[in-house]
């Protein structure tokens, strides 16, 4: 199974055992990646959900440099 990368500007799909596509995962601060991973590995659903929610807020507050308008996806190979 797959899901859409959670970054609003991204149209990539990722496996269910990954939070985001590679580029958007490594765009997150290391602290957030660690918290998401720690919650997932420990099975602490509440901590995992809280960390993912914080990451979604970070994505909203830190749009990628290439995004000129919400919803634009000018990456190579991306579909609109």
Image (cartoon, helix red, strand yellow):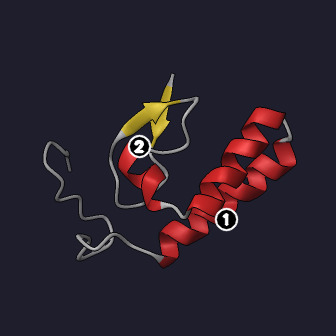
Farthest residue, direction left: 76
Furthest-top residue in this view: 1
Query: Mark 1 vs mark 2: which is more N-terminal?
Result: 2
| SS label for mark 1 | helix
Q: Which of 22/79 is in front?
A: 22
Between residue 60 and residue 34, name the one nearer to us: 34
Find numbered disc 2 in the image and state the secondary structure of the residue it sits on.
loop
In the picture shown, does residue 69 fall above or below 11?
A: below
Q: Which residue is mark 1?
A: 54
User: Does the CB distance between marks 1 and 2 fall below 8 Å?
Assistant: no
Which residue is located at x 50 percent, y 78 percent? 61
Instruction: From the top left corner, tell me how far across and down residue 74 is, in percent.
Output: 16, 59
Task: Pinpoint residue 68: horizontal percent, then vertical percent.
Answer: 23, 76
Give percent across and percent down for residue 47.
82, 51
- Residue at coordinates 58% horizontally, 29% vertically from top-left? 17
Judged left or right of residue 51, residue 9 is: left
Q: How many marks?
A: 2
Count residues near mark 2 (Cα–Cα under 10 Å), then give few for <14, some for 14-19, many for 20+.
some
Q: Is residue 9 above or below residue 6?
A: below
In the figure, 8 relative to 68: above or below?
Answer: above
Residue appearing at x 73%, y 38% in the figure: 40
Mark 1 and mark 2: span between their CA atoms?
A: 17 Å
Disc 1 packing (10 Å; few <14; some 14–19; many ≥20): some
Q: Is residue 50 left or right of residue 7?
A: right
Residue at 54% from the left image edge and 64% from the top image edge: 29
For disc 2, the marked residue is 21
């Amino acid at each position: 199974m797959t899901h859409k990368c959670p970054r609003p500007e991204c149209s990539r799909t990722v496996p269910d055992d990954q939070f985001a596509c590679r580029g958007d995962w490594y765009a997150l601060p290391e602290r957030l990646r660690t918290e998401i991973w720690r919650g997932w590995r420990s099975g602490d659903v509440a901590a995992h959900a809280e960390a993912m929610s914080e990451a979604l807020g970070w994505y909203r507050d830190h749009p990628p440099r290439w995004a000129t308008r919400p919803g634009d996806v000018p990456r190579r190979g991306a579909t609109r």
